[in-house]
Image (cartoon, rainbow, N blue to C red):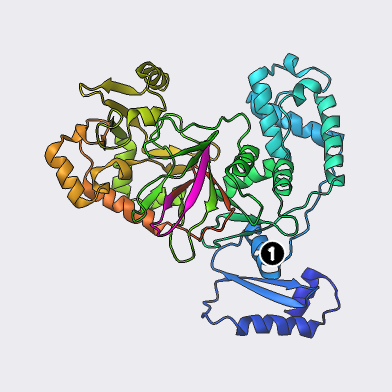
Amino acid sequence: MGRLLMAAYGTSTNTDASIRKSIQKAFENYSVSLTGTEQLVPVLHMNTNQALLIISIDHVKKSMLESIVEKTFGVVSPTNISHKDVSDYTNIIIECLRHLMGNSTSMFSVTTPFDQLGVDSLQAITLVDVLSRQLENELPVDIIYKYSTIEKLSHELQERAKLANSTSIASPGNYILDICTGMPKVYHSVNDRSLSALLQFITHKKSQLLNELTEYGALLFRHFDVITANHFAQVAQALAITHKSFLDYKDGISKRTHVMSNVFTSTEYPKHVEMALHNEMSYATEMPSQIFFFAEIPPAPGCGGETPIGDSREIYRSIDRKIRNAFANRKILYVHNMPNLGQGLGKSWQDTYRTESRKEVEEFLCSRHIEFSWQPDGSLRTIRSMEAVKRHPLTGDWLWCNHAHLFHPSDLQPELRRTLESRLTPVNMPKNCFFADNGEVIPDNYLTHVRHVLQAHQTKWSWERGDVLLLDNYRVAHGRAAFSGERRILVAMC
């Protein structure tokens, strides 16, 4: 074992015997019986003469291994800086063009302007986005117009890389908070916790962070000086997907308070109510891709109020096949009845669409192809048929992504449900949902099963003041635990 480790890790001041002793100690401290089929990964930290033995029944991903090592030894693995020459960048641009044009055999002249190669303005934006992700470096949209040929752009990309490598950016520490679920990935301040340091890091590493958001589903930024709603808005703006607009929460079913710009409070449900996992506005025709949370006032320790998250891919796989197929094949018909302001149960249509103008509401609903009707009492009813399962827009993974369990009457307290159902027809309930193919009522036991699956896939941790959490709203669902005392979590979405 010692000779094997020395061959793998190279010579050092550590002796063969000391390495064997370290490994032996690691085994002695591991109290769980081994079957002989586990993967063993010995890690040696030569500077501190420490050893870590990782034992797993599954393959340990490189990213997870690095996170475990960093969390254990408190060090960051050195980044391998890739030095590319102009030809490397030329090849990258050509491959991105082939991907964009949908032709793997296309030949491109490096001196021909992009517009003459058939790249229109919309494709230029897509090309910049693809290049940014490929290079893990956010590029400005107009770079293709300033450097209008493959040759010119290759030279510019090389110069930018040289400048980036020569500029020192303070990198936060990072680790995976929950190793079992692989999320969220946490970035925490090491030396400089200032807001400007965080914004500089995000700007410099934005493409990398967006790639990690796709990989992990959730990123948590902790121990930085994010103090106010304005600070949060700046962080959210820096992390937002390029060309995506922040949503003003029109058409949202939950009560929220507008704080500033595109920042709102999180759902204002009673403290004692648990909110099940869900993907924000999954019932909407324009569902947010990202959702941001900010712990302006976290709950006191032991008082609950966590924001649990869950992997929508794993939830999809865990739903009973018969139930999943019923939802997938028949879709969901959402019915939402909104009273006139101050005249009925639930959120008014004026609050939902942030206007008192019926014309503006109608224009909004028509633009999103949502069926609606004004009722004699001045209330508004919307009806929409939506998919119950979705494919992730980037990875193509199947996701459980709907609001059936929150629209269905089984989500109500039993006494309230009995009262409402004794007075109202199903279509007149404040919220309800049906199978879209024939309007049939969705059985209670289907939703009971769904809630059990959602509960089983929760990952949660305590908020700390100043935390900023970013979720891929397709890949990761979120909820809210009941709480006592004070709690103020702010939200933005795009």
Q: Residue furthest front?
A: 342
In screen coordinates, is 242 left or right of 304? right
In screen coordinates, is 354 left or right of 102? left
Determine which quarter of the picture holds residue 371: top left
In screen coordinates, is 64 left or right of 247? right
The amino acid pointed to by label 1 is Glu
Q: List x then y, in percent, for residue 155.
A: 86, 31
Residue 104 appears in the figure: no
Toward the viewer: 41 or 363? 363
Q: List x then y, in percent, for residue 392.
A: 50, 39
Residue at image position (60%, 83%) is 29
Toward the viewer: 256 or 123? 256
Q: List x then y, in percent, for residue 492.
A: 53, 39
Q: Residue furthest top?
A: 116
Residue matched to label 1? 70
Give yes or no for residue 230 being in the magenta stretch. Answer: no
Q: In what quadrant of the picture does the N terminus appear? A: bottom right
Determine which quarter of the picture holds residue 151: top right
Answer few, some or many: residues within 10 Å of disc 1's Cα (few below 14, many 20 plus, some between 14 and 19).
Answer: some
The count of marks equals 1
Q: What kind of element bears circle 1? A: helix
Toward the viewer: 452 or 149? 452
Residue at image position (87%, 38%) is 85
Q: List x then y, in percent, for residue 209.
A: 65, 45
Residue 66 appears in the figure: yes
In screen coordinates, is 146 left or right of 486? right
Magenta extent: 479-494
Residue at image position (53%, 78%) is 34
